[in-house]
């Protein structure tokens, strides 16, 4: 650990990073998955230069091009010049972002960034408290943690202090669109996975609105937590947010919306109506490392009742800033979310919003919607591909379905094809099970993605599918 090592190490990291970024547009997306040789822990350190050189060597062929334009299997953006530079700057500053005592800068920027996010999505910034998180999972943990506290208070209990013992079993109502991360949050919060009731009306998982109303009505005024999805991961579909908000207001339920990427529909006039009603939610969870294209990992939660966040997540110790039940100043975002150790994650978000503005982000989202429509058209025109659902946003579910293959064999064929595509590495898209079939679910959220990238996705899928058929897979 020597001061003179810092500048050469940073310059070497810059050089390696620039080289990686420069090759992203054409890079092989997939990476080797076998474990590398295990190095013994050195007794004497090798120094900063050699340590970095070893990391660069290991990155060669093993770092997935997840920031590149053909990484479609997960809904993940890339990094822009502004957001990557801001993330580097955040690491260099190494701020303790848990409170304004630790870093006035980090808290200033987080408050500004979350306010701007509310404005970007046409949400009243004065009505919401925002907090940055590692992603939409921890953002849902914030929203559902506040919901749990609200639910306990409806029963006359402070569950953050006393726990859930002795209280009725919580009721969580949702559709088949619900993401696995929400179920994980219910487990972490002690509500329980089994307390989630999925009310679906079809094989998409679409909400049975009549069943939701019936279930709320049957509770006799007891509190319930309703979870809506804005942007289902296999199809991009939305729950009927306005109708769900109506029911929650009528029956006194909490409405949490998992809007990991669907919240960005509100910036594009052509699809903004999909997210109508989200402004009436009690809590919203979203990702920044998806459509905002900031470095992984980054998310944010927006919650109406700040005091419920503070009661749930506050921590008290003699060496820490005073903790108040309503989260009032001094400003301590660590008391509004699960992380006590927090980096200045808001800096890249701030940079993204400042560098692009509302118009730039709208243009990017609309460009991705156009690319999704282009992909849908290519799939529809291909004789050996089949759309599995309509394109609702930026996700296009489809499968390989050539003539001469029995319908009952298509799942096995597509499962094998998905594995082959990932092994091939030119594009990154695996399989899912949606509408009772195995299919691909490419999602477009990276600012680098071009028409030729989605065209290559179709070409690679068809070519590798043909190879499987030539090998005898799936033939009658």
Image: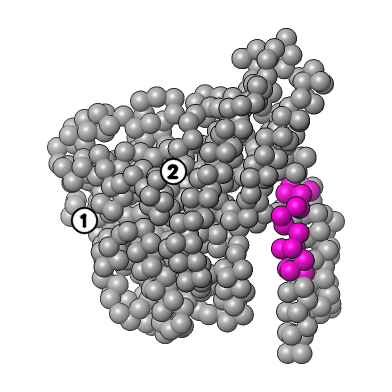
Q: Is residue 87 visible?
A: no
Q: Disc 2 marks which residue? A: 231
- Percent across and percent down for residue 25 are 71, 55
Q: Within 10 angstroms of label 1, few (less than 14), some, or many (20 or more) residues?
A: some
**Quadrant housing the C terminus:** top right
The foreground one among 142 and 9 is: 9
Residue 151 in the figure: left or right of residue 442: left
Q: In this view, does 320 lie above or below 444?
A: below
Label 2 secondary element: loop
Q: Disc 1 marks which residue? A: 153
The foreground one among 358 and 77 is: 358
Q: Do the residues labelled 1 and 2 touch (CB within 8 Å)?
A: no
Q: Is residue 264 visible?
A: yes
Residue 30 in the figure: left or right of residue 319: right
Point 53% across, 38% down: residue: 373
**Quadrant housing the N terminus:** bottom right
Disc nearer the start of the sequence (1/2):
1
Residue 344 — which label?
Answer: none
Label 1 secondary element: helix
Please provide the residue range marked out in magenta. 16-32
Magenta stretch: residue 115 in it? no
Q: Nearer the viewer, mark 1 or mark 2?
A: 2
Point 39% across, 74% down: residue: 112
Point 48% across, 50% down: residue: 366
């Amino acid at each position: 650990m020597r001061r003179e090592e810092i500048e050469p190490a940073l310059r070497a990291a810059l050089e390696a990073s620039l080289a990686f970024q420069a090759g992203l547009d054409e890079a092989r997306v997939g990476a080797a998955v076998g474990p590398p040789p295990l190095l013994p822990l050195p007794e004497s350190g090798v120094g900063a230069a050699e340590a970095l050189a070893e990391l660069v060597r290991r990155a060669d062929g093993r770092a997935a091009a997840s920031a590149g334009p053909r990484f479609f299997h997960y809904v993940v953006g890339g990094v822009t010049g502004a957001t990557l530079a801001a993330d580097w700057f955040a690491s260099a500053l190494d701020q303790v972002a848990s409170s304004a005592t630790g870093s006035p800068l980090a808290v200033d920027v987080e408050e500004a960034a979350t306010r701007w996010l509310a404005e970007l999505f046409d949400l009243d910034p004065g009505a919401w408290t925002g907090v940055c998180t590692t992603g939409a999972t921890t953002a849902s943990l914030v929203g559902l943690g506040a919901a749990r506290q609200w639910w306990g208070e409806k029963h006359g209990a402070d569950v953050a202090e006393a726990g859930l013992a002795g209280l009725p079993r919580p009721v969580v109502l949702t559709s088949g669109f619900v993401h696995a991360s929400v179920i994980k949050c219910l487990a972490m919060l002690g509500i329980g996975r089994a307390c989630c009731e999925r009310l679906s009306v079809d094989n998409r998982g679409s909400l049975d609105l009549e069943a939701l109303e019936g279930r709320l009505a049957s509770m006799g005024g007891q509190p319930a937590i309703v979870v809506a999805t804005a942007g289902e991961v296999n199809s991009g579909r939305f729950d009927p947010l306005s109708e769900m908000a109506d029911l929650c207001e009528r029956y006194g339920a909490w409405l949490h919306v998992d809007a990991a990427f669907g919240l960005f529909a509100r910036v594009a006039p052509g699809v903004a109506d999909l997210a109508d009603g989200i402004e009436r939610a009690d809590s919203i969870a979203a990702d920044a490392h998806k459509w905002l294209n900031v470095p992984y990992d980054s998310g944010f939660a927006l919650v109406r009742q700040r005091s419920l966040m503070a009661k749930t997540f506050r921590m008290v110790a003699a060496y820490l800033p005073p903790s108040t039940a309503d989260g009032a100043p001094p400003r301590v975002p660590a008391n509004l979310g699960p992380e006590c150790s927090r980096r200045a994650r808001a800096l890249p978000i701030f940079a993204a919003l400042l560098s692009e503005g509302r118009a730039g982000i709208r243009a990017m989202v609309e460009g991705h919607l156009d690319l999704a429509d282009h992909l849908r058209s290519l799939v529809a025109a291909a004789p050996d591909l089949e759309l599995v659902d309509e394109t609702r946003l930026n996700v296009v579910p489809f499968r390989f379905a050539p003539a001469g293959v029995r319908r009952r064999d298509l799942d096995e064929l597509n499962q094998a094809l998905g594995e082959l595509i990932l092994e091939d590495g030119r594009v990154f898209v695996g399989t899912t099970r949606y509408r009772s079939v195995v299919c691909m679910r490419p999602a477009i959220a990276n600012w680098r993605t071009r028409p030729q990238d989605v065209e290559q996705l179709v070409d690679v899928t068809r070519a590798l599918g043909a190879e499987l058929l030539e090998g005898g897979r799936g033939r009658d």
